[in-house]
Image: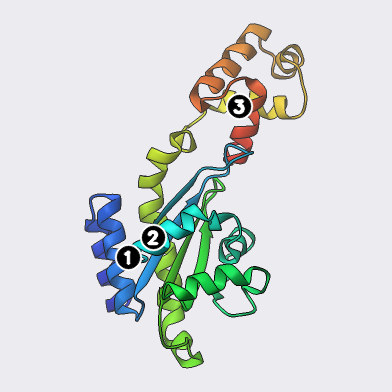
Amino acid sequence: MDGWREAQFQALLNAKSAEDLFAVLSRTAHELGFDYCAYGMRVPVPVTRPKVYLRNNYPVEWQRRYAQAGYLAIDPTVAHGVRSVMPLVWSDEVFTACRDFWEDARGHGLRVGWAQSCYNAKGVGTMMTFARSHDDLSGAELEARSAQMSWLVHAAHETLCPIVLATVAPEAGVGLSSREIEVLRWTAEGKTSGEIGTIMSIAERTVNFHVNNSVVKLGASNKTAATIKAAMLGLL
């Protein structure tokens, strides 16, 4: 590991809170030539309205505007991050379908940007964005800085994500027993408790015991919701 990565890694390890970690990311983004950085996290549950966490050091006026206008729903960089983990450089082409949003962002000093997302085994996705108000990203700068920025994206994912997740979606950190997992897997296949009991050579009441435990652990309303949540979180 080179000196730069070692220094950043130690700074992240020494951070004691989400605020401290984001401060390290913001400082490092500045060292890489960017005025701003943003960190976002998307948890795949609930299915109808996935939980989202956003933190950035953008101008306060832009933060208010972004929230009030509901820009998260149409932001093409966010949509790209959901579909792909490949880096994205802001450009007119990226914002073709939402010109008003692009002009609004530029009006608030956000003219140049680079973003990349990262996912873990639980389907939790995070994305970091580096932005500034001046100087386009040249090919030479991208060649020189892309490896560092991508490394920082993954480092942020590994260090900040667990801390935020514990508050935003504690169910993502739930551990199910091997029996609970097996019962939910068969439930996902459409099997009844009686059928699962026969398959697993256990009593039907034991099956229901494991189902109920899973429902409680996952904070679900019933076994169907628990099964879907467990599957979405990569527990099955």
The residue at 54%/53% (across/down) is: 70
Left or right? Give the position of 214 relative to 198: left
Residue 16, percent across and down? Answer: 23, 50
Q: Which dot, 3 or 1, sits closer to the camera? A: 1
Disc nearer the start of the sequence (3/2): 2
Give the side of residue 66 with respect to residue 35, left or right.
right
Quadrant where the C terminus is found in the figure: top right
- Which residue sits at x=38%, y=67%? 37
Circle 2 is placed at which residue position? 156
Give the image location of residue 162, x and y in percent.
39, 47
Question: Dots 3 and 2: beta carbons under 8 Å?
Answer: no
- 10 Å neighbourhood of mark 1: few (<14), some, or many (≥20)? many
Q: Which residue corresponds to mark 1?
A: 25
Tell which of 47 and 57 is nearer to you.
57
Residue tagged 3: 226
State yes or no: discs 1 and 2 in contact (Cβ < 8 Å). yes
Camera-side residue: 121 or 139?
139
133 relative position to 69: left or right: left
Which quadrant is the N terminus positioned in? bottom left
